[in-house]
Image (cartoon, helix red, strand yellow):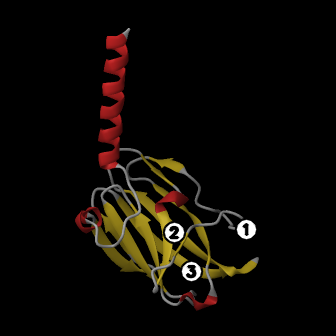
Amino acid sequence: MKKFFVLFLVLTMGVLIFAGCGGSSKTSGGSSQNASQKVVKGSVNETVTLPGDTAITVKRVLKNPEDSKMLLIAVEIKNESNVPKVYGTQNFVLRDENGNTYTPAIAKVPNPILTANVLPGKTLSGFLGFNVPESAGNLTLVFQGATGKIEVQIQPSGE
């Protein structure tokens, strides 16, 4: 019984250490993990591709007619890999020019992007909603993929 417990403990620690090596965490801009990630930049109405991972196209940016403080971003997400991928709001943040980040809201968003399993070569389309202050200035939509990031410049006035 003792050997089983020790073996279980060693295996559990090994799994935790291994999982910790590949996990994602928020770190400051100067970390070596962020430095090694590929970053691809683009703008609205341009398909921006993270090779072998994902392609993002921001179709439109507009104010939500139901909530003037909410910015709606119409996106198309294409799985560029050879395996099914799970996409959802957890992959996105909106960053302002001061480095503040905003997470997607679901309430009051028409046709929201929800978590979905997307097959290779297929797309997922819908809206991301972000509550941002008028003073936010220049905005960047950031997608976190498996192999890097896609950053799309968003004009605060939208349309």
**Mark 3 or mark 1, which is nearer the start of the sequence?**
3
Circle 1: residue type: Lys
Q: Residue at x 48, y 74 (%)?
A: 58
Q: Residue at x 45, y 86 (%)?
A: 97
Is residue 36 found left or right of 60 in the rendered image?
Answer: left
Circle 2: residue type: Val
Q: Is residue 121 above or below residue 152?
A: above
Q: Which residue is mark 1?
A: 108
Q: Which residue is mark 3?
A: 61
Q: Which residue is mark 2?
A: 75
Circle 3: residue type: Val
Looking at the rendered structure, the secondary structure element under dot 3 is strand
Where's residue 132, x and y in %? 61, 80
Q: Which quadrant would residue 52 be assigned to in this image? A: bottom left
Q: Is residue 25 above or below residue 4?
A: below
Where's residue 82, x and y in %? 31, 47
Where's residue 73, x and y in %? 56, 74
* Label 1 Cα crowd, 10 Å radius (few <14 / some 14-19 / many 20+): some
Q: Residue at x 76, y 76 (%)?
A: 66
Is residue 72 found left or right of 58 in the rendered image?
Answer: right
Q: CA distance from mark 1 to mark 3?
A: 15 Å
Q: Is residue 82 above or below residue 26?
A: above
Q: CA distance from mark 2 to mark 3?
A: 9 Å
Q: Is residue 119 visible?
A: yes
Q: CA distance from mark 2 to mark 1?
A: 17 Å
